[in-house]
Image (tube, grey):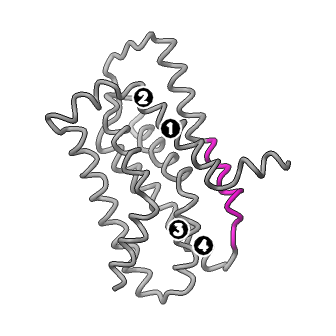
């Protein structure tokens, strides 16, 4: 029962991550290992944050968590600016630094994770330690499945080529869209209008 709850929680809060993973895997500059590492880092950080909030029994207003939506927007706009400056000329080289790609994926996963924290925190607050440990294990397994599915779609003989062909422009647009959705969904836009 705990495993089913954990799988349902993950699927309900991370469907959008599947699309982000597809965009990252399709980017010719991204290394698959860095995408996977970044996804695990991001999900791990969200779980740790949720555990921390559950332990403190504090509720973070969703509108403030939504401010993290500015991170993927800034990343997407920076990538679009770089593409325009380069004239869409890609030399096929991955980003500089061995962990830059992983940290980018992790940052976007965290920024897109306000719903994760909002859902996981109350669940962790009312579960015993053994159940929390089981939930975390299921999250790790489903994260691996998400990565495998996204990678398979990008490498699919029919679906992969169009995804990869449009990846340079697709990835920044997906990042901006995710950031805007986070701001809207969390109610952050209303918060900013009031302030």
| SS under mark 4 | helix
Q: Nearer the viewer, mark 2 or mark 3?
A: 3
Q: Nearer the viewer, mark 4 or mark 2?
A: 4
Query: N-terminal of the two: label 3 or label 1?
Result: 3
What is the spatial separation of the Cα atoms under label 2 and label 1, in whole angstroms? 20 Å
Q: Which residue does the numbered mark 1 point to in the structure image?
A: 175
Q: Which residue is mark 2?
A: 96
> How far apart are labels 4 and 2 at the CA level?
33 Å
Q: Which mark is in front, 2 or 1? A: 1
Mark 1 or mark 4: whose residue is earlier in sequence:
4
Separation (CA) of disc 3 from disc 4: 6 Å
Q: Residues within 10 Å of mark 4 (few under 14, many from 20)?
A: some
Percent across and percent down for residue 46 are 52, 62
Foreground label between 3 and 1: 1
- Left or right of residue 12: residue 51: right
Sequence-first disc among 2 and 3: 3
Frontmost residue, 12 versus 120: 12
Quadrant of the snapshot with the N terminus: bottom left
Q: Which mark is residue 41?
A: none
- The reply to whether callout 3 and callout 4 are in contact (CB within 8 Å) is yes
Mark 3 surroundings: few (<14), some (14-19) or many (≥20) residues within 10 A:
some
On the image, numbered disc 3 is attached to which residue? 48
Separation of residues labelled 3 and 1 (CA atoms): 24 Å
Give how far across and how far down residue 150 sits, in percent. 28, 47
Identify the residue at horizontal 39%, vertical 75% (top origin): 6
Identify the magenta region.
59-70
Marker disc for residue 52: 4
């Amino acid at each position: 029962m705990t495993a089913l709850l954990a799988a349902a929680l993950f699927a309900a809060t991370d469907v959008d991550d599947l699309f982000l993973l597809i965009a990252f895997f399709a980017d010719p500059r991204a290394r698959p290992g860095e995408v996977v590492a970044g996804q695990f880092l991001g999900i791990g950080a969200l779980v740790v944050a949720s555990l921390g909030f559950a332990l403190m029994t504090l509720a973070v207003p969703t509108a403030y968590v939504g401010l993290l939506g500015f991170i993927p927007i800034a990343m997407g706009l920076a990538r679009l600016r770089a593409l325009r400056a380069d004239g869409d000329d890609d030399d096929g080289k991955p980003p500089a630094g061995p962990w830059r790609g992983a940290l980018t994926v992790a940052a976007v996963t965290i920024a897109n994770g306000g719903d994760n924290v909002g859902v996981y925190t109350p669940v962790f607050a009312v579960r015993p330690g053994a159940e929390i440990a089981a939930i975390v294990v299921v999250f790790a397994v489903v994260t691996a499945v998400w990565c495998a599915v996204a990678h398979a779609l990008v490498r699919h003989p029919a679906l992969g080529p169009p995804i990869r062909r449009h990846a340079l422009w697709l990835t920044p647009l997906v990042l901006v869209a995710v950031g805007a959705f986070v701001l809207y969904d969390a109610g952050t836009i209303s918060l900013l209008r009031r302030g």
